[in-house]
Amino acid sequence: VAAARTLLQRGLRLNPDSEELWREYFRMEVLFVTRLTERRKVLGLIKAPVEEEAVEGALPTSIEVPELVEESKTPNKGKQTAAEMEAGLGELLGGAIPRVVLRHAAAALPQRAEFVLSLYNVAALASTPQVQKELEDAVLASAEEMQPGHPAAA
């Protein structure tokens, strides 16, 4: 993915008004988020929204490990906390990268609301209905901003 991303970005620097390159870049980023989400589901890193009930006599699912003295003395410079990493991962899985690509595509092609609307179908490739809806809403908002009153953007 990194190599494909680099090639597409290089192509867009050389040809910033190419609708095909922007569409494929957006598509690649949507599919990247989809694959990442699916991989995390398979590995059990994304929990289903099912409430867990405490079962009496059940074995613990985690182990408490005390912090070492050496760890508390080490400054945490440049290191992200688990909460910061989880927040960043949440943004990534929520479609932040495709939204940035969409914003840049709309800026590079300001007179082409029809092209931006064509990305609506690409957003349907998103991993979850929530991400799909957010991307579709972003596409419609961009098209409406580019051409207010456009019938398809309403």
Image (cartoon, rainbow, N blue to C red):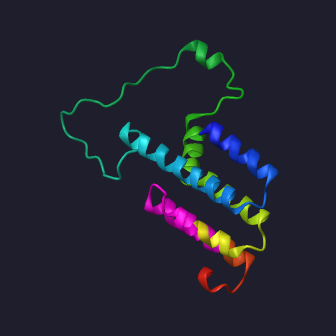
Q: Which residues are magenta?
A: 120-141
Relative to residue 110, is residue 79 depicted above or below?
above
Seen as rendered, the residue at the extreme left is: 57
Seen as rendered, the residue at the extreme right is: 14
Q: Say how many tags the image has.
A: 0
Relative to residue 101, is residue 73 depicted above or below?
above
> Which residue sits at x=66%, y=75%?
114
Q: Nearer the viewer, residue 125 or 56?
A: 125
Q: Nearer the viewer, residue 135 or 3?
A: 3
Viewport quadrant of the C terminus = bottom right
Q: Is residue 135 magenta?
A: yes
Residue 47 spot, x, y in % from top left: 37, 45
Viewport quadrant of the N terminus = top right
- Indicate the quadrant where residue 20 lies: bottom right
> Which residue sits at x=72%, y=76%?
145
Name the chief secondary structure element in magenta.
helix
Q: Is residue 103 magenta?
A: no
Q: Nearer the viewer, residue 16 or 49?
A: 16
Residue 81 in the figure: left or right of residue 58: right
Seen as rendered, the residue at the extreme top is: 70
Residue 63 spot, x, y in % from top left: 37, 25
Relative to residue 58, is residue 108 depicted above or below?
below
Residue 60 spot, x, y in % from top left: 29, 30
Residue 40 in the figure: left or right of residue 72: left
Residue 74 spot, x, y in % from top left: 66, 18
> Which residue sits at x=78%, y=62%?
108
Q: Nearer the viewer, residue 88 or 112?
A: 112
> Which residue sits at x=73%, y=47%?
9
